[in-house]
Image: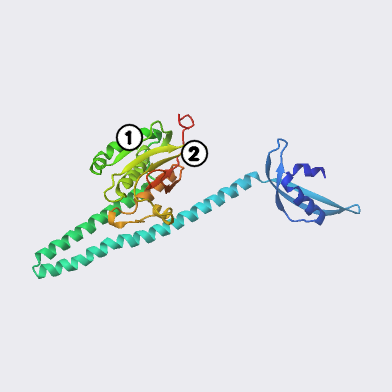
Amino acid sequence: MNGLLLIAEQSRTEVLNNIKSGYEKAYKVFGVRKTGEEYPLRLEAKNIPYKGKNVRVVEFRDITESRQVEEERERLINELEAKNAELERFTYTVSHDLKSPLITINGFVGILKRDIEQSNQEGASTAVARIEKAAIHMVELLDDLLEFSRIGRLENEYENIAMSDLAVEVEELLHGLLSASSASLEIQANMPVVYGDRLRLQEVVQNLVENAIKFVPQGTAPHIRVGYDADCGKGFFYVEDNGIGVCSQYHDRIFELFEQLNPTLGGTGIGLALVKRIVQHHGGSIWVEEAKQDGGARFCFSLLIREDSPAS
């Protein structure tokens, strides 16, 4: 029974039961090294008659490496399945949403022909304006899709990024929009330093701030806060607003391609999907919750923090 000393405590009952039953097929258990470290082990036993007795011969095989290969294989399969599912959704939504402006253009081309034939100048001008609007929307869709496809393929050099400084850069970029909307932007000082693609992470903050300006009740001046929450030692950045908020049933859906909860406010429905993809490519995650102040929404995203960062 001294061989049981090579078996981890969690597997000893199974091994003892197999000894008692004379089980001869290979099976997997956990072994234990002299250091106390547990590792995956493959056992295969044979019951051999010897000098009138039944002798049990057991082969021990360390399968740590093969286990790692198997786990990596499973990870790659799961990743491939997720990417295939994403590609299917992408193909469907692209074919659906790109058809919409084309249908509009085609319809108004017919109206334009009729108005020209009838010398209806006012009707022709309206048709041209609608065709132009649909064409511009399609160009925006294609530009955003191209940008979306580049995430993970085309990258800028990674660098240390002080997130407070990056938020100030976004504030400067959006100065005109903030002024025109009478919006106030509050930026927390000394947020942690992260390592990543500055331009891509700038896109994340800029997109979230632009949404915060856009989705406010009519007559309300947007108040936006960009900060860092070190709650429970698992910190995350956030962009919080006093806007209309997001119903809980849409918390996951809004990060999908072409999802627009209010299409009348413009946009292509790709912005938050782009943000999600950038954050995930940086090893983080993104979610939305109810704002802590003023109602509205709080978009939270985690990134890998530099260990030597002052706020880490």
What sort of colour scheme is used for the picture? rainbow
Task: Give me the residue at 17% from left, 68% from top.
Answer: 111
Residue 152 in sight from this viewpoint: no
Look at label 2 and name its amino acid. Asp
Image mark for residue 156: none
- Which residue is at 68% across, 41% downward? 38
Residue 111 placement, left or right of 59: left
292 left or right, relative to 67: left
Q: Which of 100 and 167 is in front in this view?
A: 167
The N terminus lies in quadrant? top right
**Foreground: 310 or 13?**
310
Could you tell me residue 20's position as x and y percent? 82, 54
Which tag, 2 or 1, sits closer to the chain's start?
1
176 or 152: nearer the viewer = 176
Q: Mark 2 points at which residue?
A: 231
Nearer to us of marks 2 and 1 is: 2
- In three-dimensional space, the C-alpha distance between marks 2 and 1, rounded to whole angstroms, equals 23 Å
Image: 300 above or below 48:
above
Q: How crowded is mark 2: few (under 14 residues within 10 Å), some or many (20 or more)?
A: few
Q: Position of residue 80 (x, y in %)?
A: 49, 53
- To which quarter of the image does residue 229 belong? top left
Tag 1 secondary structure: helix
Q: Name the amino acid, label 1.
A: Val
Query: Does the image show residue 158?
Result: yes
Q: Which residue is drawn at 75% across and 42% down?
A: 6
**At 36% from the left edge and 37% from the top edge, which residue is drawn?**
198
Q: Name the residue under label 1.
A: 168
| Numbered label tally | 2
The residue furthest left is 119
